[in-house]
């Protein structure tokens, strides 16, 4: 088979195969597992998807120049593999501690409809989590204080798998708190939360991959890299689109869905809105407190 035909087939099957494969792998590994081990299931699945995407970025790149290390790979890797998951885990622990405290004071009762089918619960949980994240993310592009933090993520001058976790610590804490904490307080079962965490992390990775693929109609459901690259454009006004984390449904509802045809994304980064973001971890941590910004 010629490479051209192989590439065309790959472009259409990559995204559904990656997401579906991650969900299937999670369910198989989680079967019979103790609740405390489920975060390790998520870690195993997401790291496997990451390894696959790093390989495919070399074979089927969206832009070859985005594969070149610009001194950012090490920091992006530490943040994606260690820091962001640790922050998400911290928020989970804080939420569970809050639930236990309220429960001990007789101020908390779960209101989640745990009697409905598992997949219905998953969809409902995802919609609620995505709604909160959507608005915090959108405000992060309008409120100066939030943009100071969020600009660290947009300081990347290439969009590739490893910068999916490139966030300022405070921005990462806010995003994961809004996404996860309300679900814990509502009483979403741990099995639903675990699969949602795997799918959220997997799709968050896939929305940044430097892989040439198309998701077709799935773009109306999922926030894919086809959509998210437009969100990373240097013009901050043009980047006011595609705010979803895992899903693009709320973008469609609130009028921020954007996927033009037959044109290129162009340059990515903060552009003229701020000084260049350092590639080192300490520089990125200090960045919001040092540089002048336009909100």
Image (tube, rainbow, N blue to C red):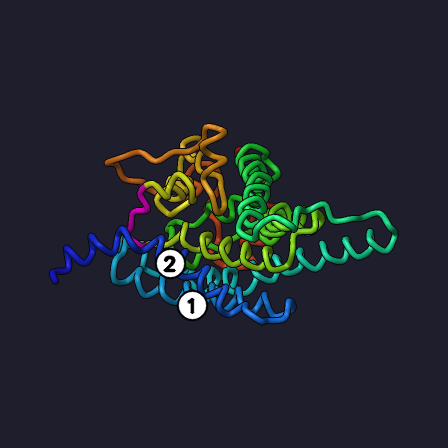
Q: Judging from the image, what secondary structure is the residue with disc 2 in?
A: helix
Q: Nearer the viewer, residue 268 or 116?
A: 116
Label disc, if present, on residue 252 of the rendered structure: none
Above or below for 107 versus 258? below
Quadrant containing the C terminus is: top right
Label total for image: 2
* Residue receiving disc 2: 18
Q: Main secondary structure of the magenta part?
A: loop
Res 165 visible: no
* Residue receiving disc 1: 48
In this rendering, position of residue 24 left or right of residue 112:
left
Which quarter of the figure has residue 242? top left
Dot 2 surroundings within 10 Å: few (below 14), some, or many (20 or more)?
Answer: some
Above or below for 159 versus 137? below
- Residue interval drawn in magenta: 211-216
Residue for point 26% across, 52% down:
11
In this rendering, position of residue 282 left or right of residue 227:
right
Which quarter of the figure has residue 130? top right
Q: Judging from the image, what secondary structure is the residue with disc 1 in?
A: helix
Residue 165 percent across, percent down from the top left: 50, 56
Give the CA separation, mark 2 to mark 1.
10 Å
Residue for point 82% across, 51% down:
102
Residue 188 percent across, percent down from the top left: 65, 52
Residue for point 44% across, 61% down:
22
Q: Nearer the viewer, residue 259 or 120?
A: 120
């Amino acid at each position: 088979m010629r490479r051209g035909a192989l590439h065309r087939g790959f472009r259409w099957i990559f995204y559904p195969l990656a997401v579906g494969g991650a969900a299937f792998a999670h369910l198989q590994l989680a079967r019979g597992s103790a609740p405390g081990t489920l975060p390790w299931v998520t870690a195993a699945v997401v790291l496997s998807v990451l390894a696959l995407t790093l390989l495919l970025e070399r074979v089927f790149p969206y832009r070859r120049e985005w594969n070149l290390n610009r001194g950012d790979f090490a920091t992006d890797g530490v943040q994606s593999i260690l820091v962001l998951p640790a922050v998400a885990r911290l928020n989970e622990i804080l939420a569970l501690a809050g639930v236990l405290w309220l429960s001990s004071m007789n101020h908390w009762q779960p209101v989640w409809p745990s009697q409905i089918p598992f997949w219905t619960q998953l969809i409902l949980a995802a919609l609620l989590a995505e709604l909160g994240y959507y608005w915090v993310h959108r405000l992060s592009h309008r409120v100066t204080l939030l943009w100071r933090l969020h600009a660290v993520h947009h300081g990347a001058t290439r969009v590739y798998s490893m910068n999916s976790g490139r966030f300022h610590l405070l921005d990462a804490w806010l995003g994961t708190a809004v996404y996860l904490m309300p679900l814990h307080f509502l009483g979403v079962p741990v099995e639903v939360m675990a699969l949602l965490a795997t799918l959220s992390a997997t799709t968050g990775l896939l929305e940044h991959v430097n892989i040439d693929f198309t998701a077709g109609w799935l773009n109306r459901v999922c926030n894919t890299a086809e959509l998210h690259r437009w969100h990373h454009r240097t013009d901050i006004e043009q980047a006011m689109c595609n705010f979803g984390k895992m899903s693009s449904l709320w973008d469609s509802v609130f009028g921020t869905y954007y996927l033009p045809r037959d044109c290129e994304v162009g340059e990515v980064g903060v552009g003229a809105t701020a000084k260049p973001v350092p590639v080192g971890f300490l520089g990125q941590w200090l960045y919001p407190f040092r540089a002048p910004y336009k909100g």
